Image (cartoon, grey):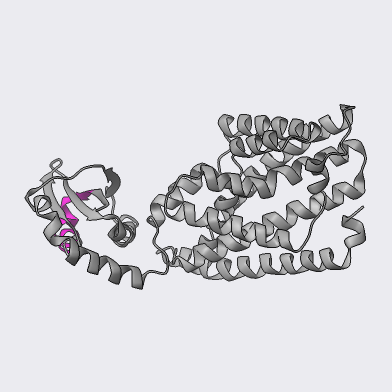
Amino acid sequence: MNLQLIEVYIPDRHFESINENLQEFDHQSYWVSSESEERMLVRILVETRNVEEILNYLEEVSNVVEGFETMLIPVQTYLSKETIHEEAKEEKEKQKQEKEEEKASLLRASRHELLSSVEKNSQITLNYSLLIILSAVVATVGFLKDSEAVVIGAMVIAPMIGPVIAIAFSSILGDYKLLGKSIATSLYGVAIVLIISILFGYFSDMGMETDQYIDRTKVTIVDIFLGVASGAAGALAFLNRLSGNLVGVMVAVALLPPSVAMGMSLGDGSYELAFGAFLLVTVNIMSILLAAVSIFSISGIRPVRWEEVQRANVSRPLSIVFVTIIIIILALVILVGKDLTYP
């Protein structure tokens, strides 16, 4: 059983009504103590699947009540008299969980936890910059040496999944400030990759007629399906707070190598090849975004405040329509302009 602890600090004058409402939510245990002369502390032990409902209520309250604070704490172990007889209750709990799964389109962590993770992924940090630089150098060398193993190694360390998932998530919520930061972080990462690969392409005399390079300057309709699969896998891993390493490699497959190929082509003055690589990067990014936005929409991620709900109701369909139109245009370019993408 996955449990989490919610700590709520409630001003005395609002305690009775809020305490009464909180006890109506499903919970494992409930404690009340006096934090100070002016505030009471309520601790609620709840199952993970019930966390978001309670946090949504607390978010509404905190918007109008002064001195109201909430913390969410993960619980590693919980022991009580009831847990000793857990096996006897297991069948009943399983039936309840199955009903909950039928109600939910997708199992996921709470919106608040996911939003916190997205905000971290939208930040430009020293660690992010260094990993992008290192992955770009390794991938470019792998292209020049025609080494598939080296290119795969570069994709393992490339942190490209975070900002892309952040773009999709923020567009679903209609959080335009976060969306702008996420786009800036993604463009920053791609720009670093381009600069490094352009320099290698301009100064290197090793020759670029390698399979690893040529393959990333060609684009086909099949690449759209690769991007969609990568985006869907990344979104599902993010929703369930799973390790993003393996899924991150899948997303990096779609983004890092073609970005390197585009930079090397520009550095070498091969503009037709650069166009093919650019088209592949764009197709992959849009396909990933379409899949991620769709998965997040299906999962039922919604804000609770009225003004945020209004923005999300506009932003969500617009995001899906916009990305879909771009992909259709790109697909037409691929089908009609093969002579431009295949030198």
140 relative position to 161: left or right:
right
Q: Which of the 4 image quadrants contains residue 125?
A: top right
Picture coordinates of residue 266, whole percent (x, y): 87, 40
Please report the residue visible at 66 percent of the width from the left and 33 percent of the height from the top: 135
Please report the residue visible at 13 percent of the width from the left and 45 percent of the height from the top: 79
Picture coordinates of residue 154, whole percent (x, y): 65, 35
Q: Main secondary structure of the magenta part?
A: helix
Please report the residue visible at 87 percent of the width from the left and 27 percent of the height from the top: 204
Question: Can residue 21 be seen by looking at this rendering?
Answer: no
Question: Can residue 323 be seen by looking at this rendering?
Answer: yes
Residue at the left extreme, as displayed:
81
* Relative depth, front residue between 242 and 192: 242
185 relative position to 87: left or right:
right
298 relative position to 69: left or right:
right
Q: Work out whether 270 lies above or below 88.
A: above
* Relative depth, front residue between 52 and 284: 284
Residue 18 sits inside the magenta stretch: yes
Q: Which residues are magenta?
A: 7-20
* Relative depth, front residue between 22 and 163: 163
Picture coordinates of residue 17, whole percent (x, y): 17, 62
User: So how many labels did they put on this image?
Assistant: 0
Please report the residue visible at 56 percent of the width from the left and 52 percent of the height from the top: 165
Q: Work out whether 60 lies above or below 213.
A: below
Q: Which of the 4 image quadrants contains residue 326?
A: bottom right
* Relative depth, front residue between 34 and 143: 143
Picture coordinates of residue 272, whole percent (x, y): 91, 50
Residue 94 sits inside the magenta stretch: no
